[in-house]
Structures are given as C-alpha cells and as structure tokens.
Image: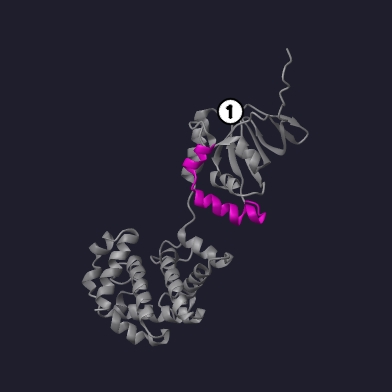
Amino acid sequence: MATKNVLKVPDKTAPALQLQSSPPVYVTVLPGKWLLKHTTPSWRIKDPIKGFQRIVKEDRAKQIARTVLDRDRTFPNAITLATDLTDFKRIDHQLVLPDKSKFLVVDGQHRLWAQTFSQKDAQYACIVHLDKTEQEMAEMFLEINDNQRRVPSSLRWDLVRLVRPEGDEAGVTSAEIVFELANRADSPFNIAIDLTGEQKDLSIKQGSLAPEIKTLVGRLKRRYDPSFEDYVSLIIRFFSAVRALNPEGWGDPSSTYYKARVLRALIRVLTDLALDAGSLASLTAPFLLTKLQKIDPATLVDERVRAAQGSAGVTDLYQAMRTQVFA
C-alpha cells in the first residue's frame, strides 16, 4: 500500500539575544502573520481567534493597523510572550522555533491583532519568556497588566500638542488653546493649569478642559471659521467674566465657580452663546458677565457638584445653567 508523503512545515528561525538563562528569556523579532498562527491571548480559550476577539477592542486594533502597520512604522516597545517550552534550539545567533510552538500573549494583544487588518506583514519585537507554568503565566499577565498605569489624560493632550497628529485638527487646536490659557499673562488661569497631570497641587487639569474646548472648536469652526487668536481671545474673555462672578474665590477649588466640572459645563454654555451670537466679536467680557450673572449660585452648591459625576453629571450642570443664562 502506498503511503502519503506528509509535507513537513519548516521550523521558523529568528535572530535572538538571550537576556537570561534560567528561566530562559529572549529578545527576538518575528513576523506578525507567523505570530498570529502561533499565539493565543488565553490558554483557557481553545480557539485563539475567539480569544483575541473577546479581549481586544476591534476599533482600536484597526486604528493601529491604519496608523502604524500600513505606514510601515515600527512599534516603540516589544510585545511580551510566554510559553511552557523549556528552551529552543539555537544556531549561531538564531532561534529555531518549531512550527508547533504556541505562545501566550502576555502584553501587546491590540498591537498583534492589528496585523489581522493589514496586508503588510509587520515585524514585531518580542520578549519571550520560556519554561513557564500556566500559573506563572497568569501571574506574569496580572503583574504586567495590573501595574500598567494609563497615560494621564492631561499628558495625552500635551502630547497631542507636541506630536500634532494628522486628522485631529480640532484636538490640536484645543491643546494649543489650553497651553495659551496656562501661559498668557492676560489669562485668568495663568500658570494655574496642570498640563501633564503631574502637578497635584493644581485642581484644574488640561485633561478636564481640553475635551470641552475641542467640542467648542469643532462647532464654531463650521459656523464662523475663526482664527486661532479668535478662539483664544474668546475663551480668555469668557473665563475673565467667570472670574468676575467671584474674584475672591478664583483659584480656590472650594469656591463656587472654580471647580473642574463647573468649568466644563460653563464651556458648553459658552458654545451655545457663541452659536447664538451674530459674531464672536460681539461676545465681549461685559456682555458675557451679564449673561453669567443670571446663574443662581445655589445651582452650584457643593452637594450638587459632588453628585455630578462623569459626563452625565456635567450635562446636568450645563442644562441647569443654560436654562438660566438663556431665560
């Protein structure tokens, strides 16, 4: 009886540097499409594809594919892999990876899954931990993912100002405006805005103001197409009027109008005032002060502001103040 010839898949070789020998840890570079066939985000989910789909956010992975892989860019950091294999055969400075090799993706799931949405076979820097039990892999996963600190929102906005990513003109303009608010001598916030999230003594953070200003920029651009100076001048006039409501309390986080959530809601009110005006120049500081004086301070008592958690709470504050301003 004739026997079928089984085509043996060749082993994968990859350049490697050994970081430690017991247990072995290597730094290597592997192609994304090969990695997708030999990795899983969870040992408990038999189908690796379903495992990735349950863990990663597809929109985020697609964005990485568009902005990094499709542009032939490389990631600034390595993905972390682990396996129960005790070691790999080495030839010179090359690792020999059997086709049956299987790795747990400890860190970098979104970066790796982005390969699914790109035609370009990206090269991934990898740190590979060998000779790990399932429990040790789980401990490593928790250690890396639980201890990772998210980039502070304020620092992210400051990076937007410096990097100026394409396609986010409103975001860049907003970050630039907040920077001006923090640095201009005529700004009510002069040196009183934490731009990076690191100045714990400052209660007003860039990450709190910038998203609301971005919305204002987007809406006013469609109506007036202002210059950058028009935006900055308008917002400085507005916050000067807010400060005039309670000059003694300005800068005090316990005062009525110097609370992040109140200021966020007030920026939304400014957006409505600007859209209702015939021109931005008509929104002078005295005119804005007249409008803001219609707000009943009782609307902003501490108990109510503390209860205004998240976006929904800011919306409640905004609606209450808007009703009074436009009464």
The residue tagged 1 is 84
Give the percent coordinates (x, y) of residue 230: 47, 82
Confirm whether the magenta stretch covers residue 30.
no
Question: Residue at 42% across / 81% down in the picture?
Answer: 234
Q: How crowded is the residue under tag 1: few (<14 C-alpha within 10 Å), some, or many (20+)?
A: some
Q: Is residue 213 left or right of residue 109?
A: left
Q: Nearer the viewer, residue 190 or 234?
A: 234
Which image quarter: residue 81? top right
Boundaries of the magenta span = 49-75
In the image, residue 33 lies at what x, y percent?
Answer: 64, 41
Q: Secondary structure at mark 1?
A: loop
Q: Quadrant of the N terminus?
A: top right
Taking the image as shown, residue 281 lies to the left or right of residue 31, namely left
| Residue that protrudes farthest toward the right in the picture | 92
Q: Let me know if residue 124 appears in the view.
A: yes
Estimate the x, y position of residue 98 in percent, counting from the top left: 68, 29
**Type of amino acid under label 1:** Asp
| Image point (60%, 39%), residue name | 36
Where is 76 relative to 215, above or below?
Answer: above
Q: Position of residue 86 (x, y in %)?
A: 63, 26
Q: Is residue 55 magenta?
A: yes
When the figure is inspected, residue 209 is found, relative to residue 275, above or below; the finding is: above
Q: Which residue is depicted at the point 67% across and 42% down?
A: 31
One can see residue 198 in this view: no
For residue 58, above or below residue 153: above
Residue sitting at the far front: 1
